[in-house]
Image: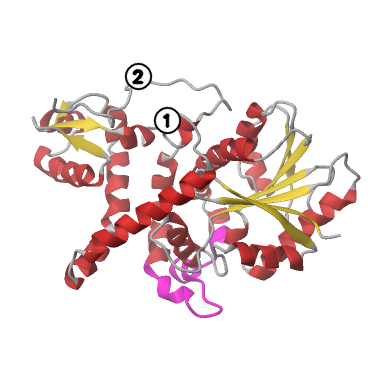
Amino acid sequence: MPGTGADEPDHRTRRTPPGRIGPADVLGVPALPPGRVAVLGNRARAGLARAHRATAPPPARVMEAVLGGLDPAALAALCRLDVPDRLVRPTACADLASELGVDASRLARLLRYAAARGWVRIDRRGRVRPTRVTAFLRRDHPGGWRAWVEFAAGDEVTAAIGRLDAGLPADGDAFATANGTSFFAWMQDHPDRHTAFDAAMAAGGRMHGLIVAHALDWSASRRVCDIGGGDGALLGVLLAQHPHLEGVLLELPEVVDRAPERPNVTAVAGDAFDTVPPGCDTYLLVNVLHDWDDEAAVRLLRRAAEAAAAEPSATDPRIVIVDSEAQDRPRDDLATRADLLMLALTPGGRERTTDQFAALASAAGLRLHRTHDLPTGDVAHVLVADR
């Protein structure tokens, strides 16, 4: 029947208790798949994308690439109009336009584009229907992924991407060229946009909190420090999965001031380049090292290593890096896109290969002990002291 199928979401509002995030909330799947399945899935998707591109002549491929920049703007327009929140049942475009106070024919053009991208559906009767993606864009969705749209559509981000060429010299900084100063300094001077950035990072934090809770063995751990952990969302989810743990959140003072209180989490204001709180058996660096060049990344790892060695522990302390993994042969995947985004937003940030992470660890007096493929397609590198 028209309008039915597996992509139809449950339109009832889900009320997820704080911290009790599940796979459906962060990945849209009923259970976390093995990391290896995610790796194979990403390879398959990249192969299909490569095959799709090969069917188009060069001019079409150029135009598809040029017009691909409409995606963030179209997503942002849908969210600013609150289409995801209002679209809870099959609705005629004219009725939706009336509710939103916009022109029906113009809204129809935006919705046709959104349907082509899979963010909504248009059935045989011309009604607009929500999809699973629509649900993830709602304000009250527990995953919080709408925040990424609001952050990425910001003028400062789009301006930096537009000056990507300025990031190519050895000392280049595309973000500073476009906005007058480097990314983190600019964010400190624009608290409203820093809040949007925090919310986007919290969405990733909730996802990674659930992922690392299941991917790593926490039975011997008692105290975990999240270095640069934003508002503590990751620790909130991790500790909800493993209540025996205590958490320490290390962030800059202005971030700690905005962070909500979380059970069994102690927030410490400080700079990880200067010192990291001792007394923990696990130190997390989740989507942190890719913000920095190799020299700064080694400094962060050294501070973590010093903290891990400062106090004796019942178990050998570990340092866990979670980041995308760059490939020697490029793929059409999120890691490749994230690497170019780092080039636009930071002067030295990048995604790295496993060998490059091992080299950073060695320079910091650590060694790569184990690598875990994660269901997100990221990897978790477990580092220990190189004795």
- The residue shown at (30%, 55%) is 48
Nearer the observer, 48 or 73: 48
Coordinates of residue 69 in the picture (x, y in percent) = 29, 59
Amino acid at pointer 1 = His
How dense is the environment of label 1, judged by Cα within 10 Å: few (below 14), some, or many (20 and up)? some
Nearer the observer, 84 or 182: 84
The N terminus lies in which quarter of the figure? top left
Q: Which residue is mark 2?
A: 12
> What's the magenta region?
162-185
The C terminus lies in which quarter of the figure? bottom right
**Sequence-wise first label, 1 or 2:** 2
Q: Which residue is mark 1?
A: 141
- Disc 1, SS: loop
- The residue shown at (64%, 45%) is 229
- The residue shown at (57%, 64%) is 352
Vertical placement of residue 325 versus 195, above or below:
below
**How much space separates mark 1 and mark 2, taking CA atoms?**
11 Å
Coordinates of residue 134 in the picture (x, y in percent) = 31, 35
Determine the residue located farthest toward the right in the rendered image.
312
The total of numbered circles placed on residues is 2
